[in-house]
Image: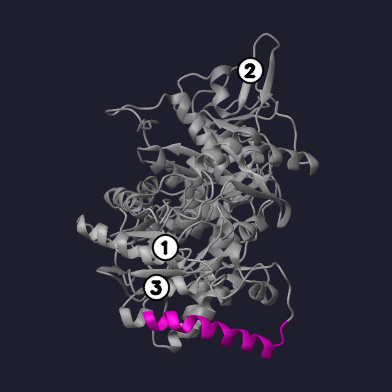
Amino acid sequence: MQEQHSLHSGLAHLSEYQRLQTLEVKIGDLLLGNGHPIRVQTMTTTDTMNTIATVEQSIRCIEAGAELVRITAPSKNEAYNLLEIKNELRKRGYNTPLVADIHFTPNAAEIAARIIEKVRVNPGNYADKKKFEFIEYTDADYVEEIDRIRERFTPLVKICKEYGTAMRIGTNHGSLSDRIMSRYGDSAMGMVESAMEFLRIARDESYHNIVLSMKSSNPQVMVQAYRLLVKTMRDEFGICYPLHLGVTEAGDGEDGRIKSAIGIGTLLEDGIGDTIRVSLTEDPEFEIPVCLDLVKRYNGITAASTVPEIIKLPYSPFEYRRRDSFAVENIGAKQVPVVVSDMSSAETINPEQLQSIGYDYDEATDKWSIGDAAADYVYTASTPISFALPGTLKNIVNASIWNASSESQFPIFSLADFVGAVSKSTRINFVMVDCYSDNHGALSAQMEMIQEAATNQSVVFCLSSTNRNAMQSVRRMFIELTNLGIRNPVVLVTDSGMHTPDEHLIHFATETGALLLDGMGDGISLGFNGKAIMENTKAKGRTYLPVKDIYQFTNNTAFSILQATRTRISKTEYISCPSCGRTLFDLQETTAKIRSVTNHLKGVKIAIMGCIVNGPGEMADADFGYVGSGPGKITLYRSKEIVKKNVDSEVAVDELIQLLKDSDAWVEPA
C-alpha cells in the first residue's frame, strides 16, 4: 500500500489542488504547460477544402474564446489547403495557432507541419492499419515493428524540429493498433505504450515540442490512462510533457457535458492537464463556453488546505475497485449507488411535485408509476411528507422532527448531534460530516466522533466539504475511513453555488464523478448553496427556473453522473463523436433521430460515428454501431462485427432498429 502512495504522489497531492509541473511547449506565439493557464481549444466541422466556411467557423470559435483551432487533414489536398485557410485568417487579423488533425496519412502530416503551428498524429493509425487481428510477437519481432514505425515517423519529427512546429501524440482508446492490442490488450497500459513508442522516437531526435493525450469515450479508462502516462514519463524520463485532455465521443446536451466534465474535471482536480477540448456533437463554438467553465475553476489558484497529509494510500489510482462497505438496507455493499433528491427548499410537498424525481401519481386509480430515473430517497428537511409514499421511496428529515413510528421516514443528524442523541433509528441513521473544514485543532475531535458513530451498524455517512478543495477533502476522508477499517456506506453530498445550468453540471460532475471513478460512494445527493435558484440562460435578463425544474435538473443530473461513471445504468448510452471535416452525414440530426427512437432501451450502448477513423475501435465499448462509410452510406455494427455495409442513410435508422430486434435488444416503447 505504501508503494501505491508513492506512485500516486507523482501525480499531485491527493489532499489538495496542485498543478502538475510539465515542460513548456511553444505553439506559434502560444505557450502551453510549465504553469501557463490551461488553454482551451476546439475542432472545426466544415469541409477543409471549403476555405471560407472553415475560416468563418474558426473565427466564431476564436471569438468564443478558443486559443487553438484544429482542422482535419485526411489527405494531401486538405493539408495543402491549410495554407489558404491560414492566410485568410491572418488577413482578417486572427493569429490563433492552427492544428492539423492527421489519421492514416503521414504524407499529409509532413505537408501540414511546414504550414501551420501544430500537427496531431494518432499513434494507433499513423503507421498501422487496424484489422482487429491478434498477432503473436517475439521480442525480436516487436523490435522490428518499432524500427518500422521509426522509419515512418522520423521524417515528420525532423520537419517539425526544423520548422518549429509543435506536435500532439494523441492516443485514442478506440484506435489502438493490432500490434498494441496483441501485446498489451485493451488496457490503459496499451494506450500509454502506444504514445510512449512515438515519444521515445521523438526524444531520440532531440525533439521535445510535444503534447500528449489519452482519449477514451469511457471516463474511467481515460482517467486511469492519463495517470499511468504521468507515472510512466516520470519513471522513464524524470519529467512530464504537457497533456491535452478530452473525452472522445462524449455526445451532446447534458450527457455530453457531464461525461466530459467527469473525465476532464477528475484529472484537473488532480492537477493534470495543460489544454482541454470538450468534444460535443454540436457546433464547435458551443464547446468553448463549456471549456471555459471547466478551466476557470483552476487557473490562478494555489494550494491551500487544512487537510492532513496522506501517510498511506489504501487503493490503486490506476484501476477501479469499489470501496468495501457493508449494507444498510439498500445502501452500500455491492448494491448500485442510491440517489437522494434534495427537496429541502420546498415549503410543502404534494404528490404532483414528486413527478420531477421520477414518481407519477394517478389520483383516480390511487397508483404510482415509477420511472427508471426515480430517486430512492427524498430529503425534505423540516417538512415531513404527510401522504403515503410508493414503496421504493423513503423520506429523510431533520432528526429534530423525525417520527420514529414511521416506516418510510429516517432521520439525518449532524455528527455531533448523532453522538449525543438519545433517540435514533434502528434501521437507518444518516450522519452529516463536513470533511476537514474545521481548523487542525478540531480535526482529532471530529475523527473521534466519526469512529464512535461508525460503531453503529445503522449509520450512513453523508460526506461533503465547505473547503475550496472540496473533492480532495472528501477523498482524504475516504482514505482515512478505509485506513481505520470503517466500512459504513457513504452518500456523496455536493452543493453548487454556481448560476448557469452548464456551470452546475460541471460542478456536480467534477466533484462527485471524480470520487465515483475511484470507487468511492454508495449514493449521491445534489443541491444548491443558499436559495435554490438556477439562471435560465435562454431568457433575456436575470430570470430563474421554477423550483420544480430545479428538482428535476438535480435528479436527472445525479442519474446521468452515475451512468457516465458506469456505476448505475438507468438509460440508453450514446457514444457519439463530435463531427469534423471527415464526417459523412449530418451527425447532429442523425444523433437526435436515433436518440428519439431508442432512448427507452435502458442499458444499451449505441455508438454513432461520423466516419471510420475511430468508429470500430470506440465501438468495442458499445453494443451497436452506426458509422459513416461513404457519402450517404452507413455501416452497421454489432459490437466490433460488421453486420451490414453501405446502407443508404435514408433507411439506415430503420435498419438499426431491425438489427436491435434481431439481436433481442429491442423492446417496444411504453
In which quarter of the view is residue 304 placed? bottom left
Numbered label attached to residue 503: none
Residue position marked by numbered label 1 in the rendering? 78
Single out the mark in the foreground, 2 or 3: 3
- Say which element carries label 1: helix
Residue range (magenta): 137-159
Measuring 46% from the left and 61% from the top, which residue is drawn there? 267
Image quadrant occupied by the C terminus: top right
State whether residue 449 is above or below residue 206. Answer: above
Single out the mark in the foreground, 1 or 2: 1
Q: Amino acid at mark 2?
A: Tyr
Image quadrant occupied by the N terminus: bottom right
Q: Looking at this rendering, what residue extends furthest in the front direction? A: 77
Q: Is residue 209 visible?
A: yes
- Say which element carries label 2: strand
Q: Amino acid at mark 1?
A: Glu
Residue position marked by numbered label 3 in the rendering? 111
Measuring 42% from the left and 77% from the top, which residue is drawn there? 240
